[in-house]
Image: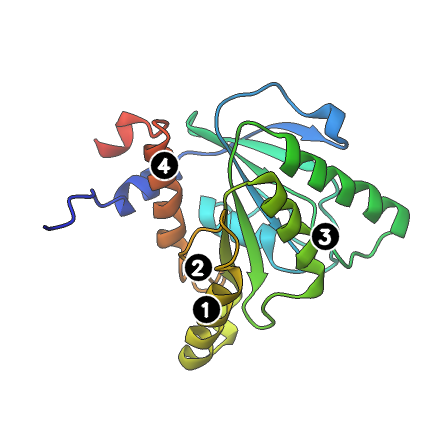
Amino acid sequence: MTDQRPDYTEAGRRLFAREPEFYWAAAKSTDLPPPRGLEIAFAGRSNVGKSSLINALTGRNSLARTSHTPGRTQQLNFFDVSGAFSFIDMPGYGFAAVGKEKVSAWTGMIHDYLRGRVELARVLLLIDARHGLKATDDPVLETLRTAAVPFQVVLTKADDLTEKQAIAMKAAISAKIARHPAAHPDVILTSAKTGQGIPELREAIAYLLAERGALPDWVWK
């Protein structure tokens, strides 16, 4: 039997063709906004290239703040995408060029959000393709496991790897997350610099929305 699943590549492109709208910032878990539908969160170490990937995904140069200094995002930033869903730019965890007390506070906020947000449909866990999973990723993986939050690994900075290295890293990550029941089996290789993997990531998000009945009809027109 042939696969009758529609091609979500164009739907994903159209979904992100409109200007995302920033609408809320939360500095602590008690400041979260009222629900506005499905949410997809971007999580990763503070130097993983999260802001650059978000800008590439949305086709905007400065939607998410980029910096050579890790730790510039210090709150949960909520963006509306075409009225279909919200994406959340989360503070990076691990090393950051700010005080340990502040890092501890926003790391706690990340875990509170991941454990308690009913609207959270998926976490995109960003991992530097050059380094793979690190010990600093373990607490977030454990939180996702215990809270049964679906997540998908997105490898960043893939342009710094050869094709052989990229294939090996993708296979290694897939093997490591296979024991997590909430892990999506597809690991996406991306590069904000070259655009590698951006259409695939948009497609994955569009398909997720379709599964949840939240993909707007206009993306097919």
Image x and y of residue 16, in percent: 40, 39
What amino acid is at disc 1? Lys
Q: CA distance from mark 1 to mark 3?
A: 22 Å
The numbered dot on residue 93 is 3
Which image quarter: residue 15?
top left
What amino acid is at disc 4? Leu
Let me know if residue 191 appears in the view: yes
Tell me the residue at 56%/55% (across/down).
126
> Observer-nearest residue: 38 or 138?
138
Mark 2 — residue? 187
Mark 4 — residue? 15
Q: Of helix, strand and loop, which one carries label 4?
A: helix
Q: Counting residues from the N terminus, which is met first, the one under dot 1 or under dot 4?
A: 4
> Which color scheme is applied?
rainbow
Q: CA distance from mark 1 to mark 4?
A: 27 Å
Marks 3 and 4: in contact by CB < 8 Å? no
Using residue 81 as the reference point, say whether residue 88 is left or right of it.
right
Marks 1 and 2: in contact by CB < 8 Å? yes
Badge 2: how crowded within 10 Å, few (<14), some, or many (20+)? some
Badge 4: how crowded within 10 Å, few (<14), some, or many (20+)? many
Using residue 76 as the reference point, say whether residue 22 is left or right of it.
left
Where does the C terminus fall, quadrant-wise?
A: top left
Q: Counting residues from the N terminus, which is met first, the one under dot 2 or under dot 1?
A: 1
Q: Of helix, strand and loop, which one carries label 3?
A: loop
Q: Counting residues from the N terminus, which is met first, the one under dot 4 or under dot 3?
A: 4
> Observer-nearest residue: 179 or 91?
179
Q: How many marks?
A: 4
What amino acid is at disc 2? Val
